[in-house]
Amino acid sequence: MPASGRAAAETRPDWPGYYAATADRPPRRTTLTALAARRSGTDSASALAVDLGCGGGRDTTPLLHAGLTVLALDRAPEAGAALQARFPDAWNRGQLTFRRADLSAADLGLPPSGL
């Protein structure tokens, strides 16, 4: 049975706190491997990267620094606010966009991407 009222508020994840705590961690190895493959020409030349479960931008940072346009997806709407605050220039010029998405959904409706 789902929690309700005060119990629900007490068990709700603190996404802003989590994003703040993890945003400056190094990027995941999978992200660095994908970027290296792209640079070596063994991956698609698309300039769009999709960051699934973007959170506070741990993996968004190197994608933006590589000059890619990033579509960031996360279930929590707070992730979009965190990204907009952390990367205002990329956000304002359209290099970074956020879409709220439940990653357990079978069809996310994603555009073709190279990373």
Image (cartoon, grey):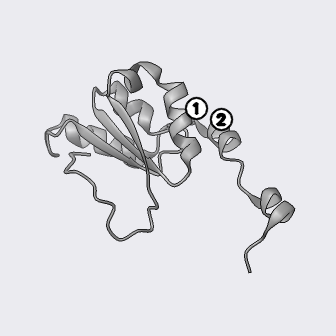
At 21% from the left and 39% from the top, the residue drawn is 38
> In the image, what residue occupies the spot 42% across and 36% down?
60
- Which image quadrant for residue 107? bottom left
Residue 31 percent across, percent down from the top left: 38, 44
Whole-Å distance between the Cαs marked 1 and 2? Answer: 8 Å
Which of these two is toward me, 19 or 99? 99
Marker disc for residue 104 = none
Quadrant location of the N terminus in the rendered image: bottom right
Kind of residue at badge 1: Asp
Residue linked to disc 1? 24
Give the x, y percent position of residue 86: 53, 26
Residue drawn at the location 58% of the way across and 32% of the way down: 24
Q: Is residue 88 left or right of residue 70?
A: right
Q: Give how far across and how far down residue 80 sits, in percent.
A: 50, 39
* 75 versus 99 height, above or below: below
Relative to 90, is 8 on the left or the right? right
Residue at left 77%, top 71%? 3
Amino acid at the residue labelled 2: Ala
